[in-house]
Image (spheres, rainbow, N blue to C red):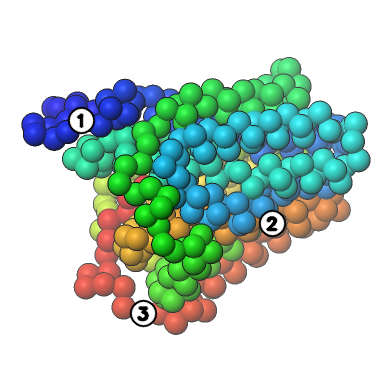
């Protein structure tokens, strides 16, 4: 097999691509995404250790995620226009890591409202750790090698979702929550060289674009709203993320009260990631068994059932509940990607992905901010509320009138 970075006969070699390997891309993406997955649980644990308050802990998580609704689409549009997007991406990663450090320094030293403001500003750059990388992949690997590269890129998400929360919880238990925050920022910093060296864009410089950034953003939002299958999937996934944020805000107390340690709560997130991977592997063997549109709402019901089971408050049911939640979350994300690819025009694909992702992150933040105070009053009440929201996500799918999905309706679910 020809190496992805070696040009075909008669094809002019791109000097930047010849110096940049897929391996370097994957190492950078994996480091950034592992740091991203660590950051939320690590900040929650640090906030809880500093103030002893679930409300403060969930507020930090909400602060660093809620501003993504603004930062994600804007960052995506700027990356699409930049001649050297890698430089912009590296700058965003560096500022995000610095923001993590500033939040840690501020805990217990600055007024908590100031620390929350720092978290909100840092969160504007959060999408750089995930979608910002994937958008650069076509310039790293030629068209023939892109499917394989996409599969490898998707694996970095799965690896990060497994390693990040477990690493945050383990470090918090052994060395303290501040250490987990420092390691999270360090992993993001390790991704800087891989981002900085990304190939430049050729033939589509800043001056070749006649539309404004605002018009690009508006076009992506209109595309999401005007296509019923895309709008239904987006609405259901966003409401599901509200429930997922509520669960995450409860993880510290679940670990402390049910599993014997606050850090164990973060490890439950890795259990959900394992079951999500297994569920997607099973569906991959039978890709046409269910249409992705069906998976979107059915998986929300599975998550609702898992959240309801978690209210039992005993170790075994809680572990089973988290595994069930992962079984719902994994296929739902894969189905959402399949619908976005199916319904998105090529010239708006990046905007649609970043806008949808930002809405989901914001939904997650809203859920976390609501569940923190409720969990302080009643952990079981917060989990029951999350189960109700997940059930509402399934119903939300049918609020938007249906439209013809396609000739077969059954599409392969791929990450």
CA–CA distance in space, label 1 to label 3? 45 Å
User: For residue 228, which quarter of the picture?
Assistant: bottom left
Q: Is residue 232 visible?
A: no
Q: Position of residue 89 (x, y in %)?
A: 51, 37
Residue named by callout 2: 367
Does label 1 or label 3 sit earlier along the sequence? 1
Q: Is residue 372 left or right of residue 288?
A: right
- At horizontal 59% and vertical 47% (from top left) the residue drawn is 321
Q: Residue furthest left?
A: 9
Question: Disc 1 or disc 2, which is closer to the eye?
Answer: 1
Q: Residue furthest front?
A: 207
Q: Which mark is residue 13?
A: 1
Residue named by callout 3: 403
Q: Residues within 10 Å of mark 2 (few under 14, many from 20)?
A: many
Q: Is residue 61 above or below residue 349?
A: above
Does label 1 or label 2 sit earlier along the sequence? 1
Q: Is residue 402 visible?
A: yes
- At horizontal 81% and vertical 28% (from top left) the residue drawn is 105
- At horizontal 85% and vertical 43% (from top left) the residue drawn is 114
Q: Is residue 275 above or below residue 354?
A: above
Q: Secondary structure at mark 2?
A: helix
Query: Split into 4 quadrants, where in the image is the N terminus?
Result: top left
Q: Secondary structure at mark 3?
A: loop
Q: Which mark is residue 91?
A: none
Q: Secondary structure at mark 1?
A: loop
Q: Residues within 10 Å of mark 1 (few under 14, many from 20)?
A: few
CA–CA distance in space, label 1 to label 2? 48 Å
Q: Is residue 399 left or right of residue 244?
A: left
Q: Residues within 10 Å of mark 3 (few under 14, many from 20)?
A: few
């Amino acid at each position: 097999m020809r190496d992805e970075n070696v040009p075909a006969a008669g094809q002019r070699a791109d000097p930047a691509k010849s110096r940049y390997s897929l391996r370097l891309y994957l190492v950078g993406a994996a480091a950034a995404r592992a740091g991203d997955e660590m950051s939320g649980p690590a900040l929650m644990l640090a906030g809880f250790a500093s103030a002893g308050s679930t409300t403060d802990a969930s507020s930090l998580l909400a602060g660093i995620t809620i501003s993504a609704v603004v930062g994600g689409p804007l960052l995506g549009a700027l990356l699409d226009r930049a001649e050297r997007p890698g430089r912009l991406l590296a700058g965003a990663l560096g500022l995000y890591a610095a923001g993590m450090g500033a939040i840690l320094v501020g805990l217990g030293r600055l007024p908590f409202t100031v620390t929350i403001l720092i978290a909100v500003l840092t969160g504007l750059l959060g999408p750089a750790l995930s979608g910002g990388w994937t958008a650069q992949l076509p310039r790293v690997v030629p068209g023939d090698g892109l499917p394989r590269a996409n599969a490898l890129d998707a694996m970095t998400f799965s690896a990060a979702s497994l390693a990040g929360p477990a690493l945050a919880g383990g470090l918090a238990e052994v060395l303290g929550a501040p250490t987990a925050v420092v390691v999270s920022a360090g992993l993001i910093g390790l991704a800087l060289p891989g981002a900085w060296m990304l190939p430049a864009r050729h033939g589509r410089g800043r001056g070749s674009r006649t539309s404004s950034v605002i018009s690009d953003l508006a076009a992506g939002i209109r595309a999401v709203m005007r296509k019923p299958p895309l709008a239904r999937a987006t609405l259901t996934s966003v409401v599901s993320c509200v429930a997922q944020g509520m669960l995450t805000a409860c993880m510290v107390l679940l670990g402390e009260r049910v599993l014997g340690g606050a850090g164990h709560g973060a490890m439950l997130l890795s259990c959900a990631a394992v079951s999500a991977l297994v569920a997607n592997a099973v569906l991959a063997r039978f890709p046409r068994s269910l249409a992705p549109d069906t998976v979107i709402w059915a998986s929300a019901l599975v998550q609702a059932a898992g959240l309801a089971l978690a209210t039992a408050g005993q170790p075994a049911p809680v572990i089973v509940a988290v595994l069930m939640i992962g079984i719902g979350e994994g296929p739902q994300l894969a189905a959402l990607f399949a619908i976005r690819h199916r319904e998105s025009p090529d010239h708006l694909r990046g905007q649609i992905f970043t806008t949808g992702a930002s809405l989901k992150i914001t939904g997650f933040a809203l859920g976390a901010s609501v569940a923190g105070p409720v969990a302080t009053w009643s952990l079981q009440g917060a989990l029951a509320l999350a189960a109700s929201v997940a059930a509402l996500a399934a119903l939300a799918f049918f609020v938007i009138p249906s439209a013809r999905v396609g000739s077969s309706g059954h599409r392969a679910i791929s990450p």
